[in-house]
Amino acid sequence: MFKAGTQITILMILFCFSTVTDAGPYNQPGINGYIGSDFRHANPNDIDAVINPIFRGWATGYKDYLPSDTIGSYGYDGIASEYADPCKALGSATGNEMDVVSLGDLDSTEIVDGCEPGQVTLIFGDSCNPDDPNHIRNVSGYDFVVFENGFALEYTAEDGAITGEMFAEFGYVEVSSDGENFVRFPPVSLIPQPSGSYGYLTVDITNAYRLAGKHPNAGGVCTGTPFDLQQLIEHPDVRSGVVDINNISYVRIVDVPGSGDFNDTAVNNIDPDTKPNWDVYNSNNPIYDAWVTWGSGGLDLEAVGVLNEQELSADVNLDGIVDLDDFRILVKAWLNYFGEENWVGRCDLDGSGDLLINFRDFAVFSTQWQKVEQWRDYP
C-alpha cells in the first residue's frame, strides 16, 4: 500500500478518487480487536485498551507465503522487504497498519499472462492433534476474524450496522483441515466498475460480503471481518468430509486484484431483491477494489483471530451481555427485510430463513434477556 511517511498525502488523494454509491445490503459490523471498560471499541493505543476477550486464539504459524510481486523493491510491481514477513500476521491484532504482510497485486500484463494472485496460509494449533483447542471449529456464531489494514474515510458502526467509504484491498478466504484441500467462502461484490482511472480509489464496504479486508483496521480503528463456518455446510467437500469444519487448522488468504478480472460467487448467495420468496443471484460479478497498488500492494494481512463460542445469539452487538443496547438495535431493525435500510442480520434470531425481523425473533430475544457470555471478562 504505502509507507507511513506518505499516509497523509495518500489519504488526500483517496478523497479525490472516492466513488459515491448507494449503500449496499451487507452492513454487518466488524469484530472489535480492542475494547475499553465499557466493552465497546477502543483505540489500540489507548492506555486502558485490552484485546477483546471474545478472542480465544490467534494464528501460530504459516506456510506457502507466495506473493505475486518481487520482494525487496518498493517500486512498481514490488513489495518492500518490511512488508514481506509472514510472521507479522501471527499472534494477536495490533491495530498497527504497518504491522502487516503484503500479498502483492497483479497488474494487467500479469493478469493476461495468467499469473497467480498472491497468497499466504496461516496455521492454527497443532495440525497433527485434532484435539488441539486452538483449532477453529464450527461453533455458535462467528468462528474466526480476518484483520487487514484498510483505511476508513467515512465509517460508522452503530446500531449493529455499518456505513461508509474506505480504502479496501480484498482477499478470498479459504479453510482446510489438512493443509491440502481448501474450500472458499463464496463472496459477493456489488461494487460498480470505477469510471475513469482505478488506482487508490475507495469503495462502499456495504457492497462487499465474505471478503477479507472489508472492515477498517488503521488510524486508531481496529476491526476485523468475521466468518462463520456454518456457511460452508453445504459445500461438497464439507459434506463428503474432505474438509472438516469442526477441525480447521489452516486459513488461506488469496489476494483479489481489483481490476474486475476476478469474480465473486454471488450465485451461491441470497439476492436481497428476491424477497419474500428468496432466491440466489442469477450471475456472478466482477470484484473491484484499489488497483494497482504497490510497495505493500494487494491485501495486507495483519492477523487472524479465533473466536470464543457465542452462545447468546441475542447479544447482537457482541459485548457479551444481552441488554438494553441489543434491544435498541432490535427495535430499529423491526419489520425490516434483508436488504432494507435498517436490516441487521444478527437480529434475525429465529432460524426460520424468513430474513425478516419480527415477533419470532423477539421471542428468542426475550428468552436470553440479561444473560451473560462465559467469555465476558475484563482484566
Image (cartoon, rainbow, N blue to C red):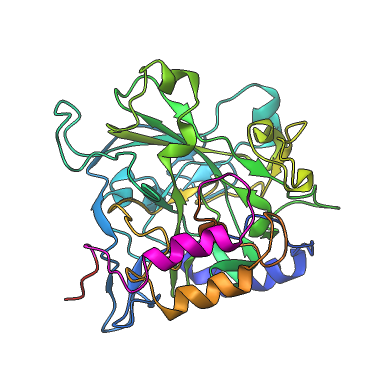
Q: Quadrant of the C terminus?
A: bottom left
Determine the image quadrant of residue 100: bottom left
Q: Nearer the viewer, residue 160 or 45?
A: 160
Q: Quadrant of the N terminus?
A: bottom right
Name the chief secondary structure element in magenta. Answer: loop
Q: Residue at 57% x, 35% y: name it.
A: 186
Q: Residue at 41% x, 58% y: name it.
A: 313
Position of 224 with respect to 213 (left or right) is left
Q: Residue at 69% x, 57% y: name it.
A: 337
Q: Is residue 96 visible?
A: no
Q: Residue at 51% x, 47% y: name it.
A: 351
Percent across and percent down for residue 65 are 37, 34
Percent across and percent down for residue 352 are 55, 45
Residue at the far right in the pictured view: 196
Q: Is residue 335 visible?
A: yes
Is 162 above or below relative to 352?
Answer: below
Whether the magenta-drawn stretch holds residue 356 is answered as yes
Whether the magenta-drawn stretch holds residue 362 is answered as yes
Is 206 above or below relative to 209?
Answer: below
Percent across and percent down for residue 365 are 45, 65
Position of 129 with respect to 221 (left or right) is left
Q: Nearer the viewer, residue 63 or 140?
A: 140
Determine the image quadrant of residue 93: bottom left
Position of 113 with respect to 34 (left or right) is right
Give the residues drawn in magenta, as a range.
Answer: 351-375
Position of 375 with respect to 14 (left or right) is left
- Looking at the rendered structure, the number of numbered marks drawn on it comes to 0
Is 344 above or below relative to 178?
Answer: below
Percent across and percent down for residue 196 are 85, 52
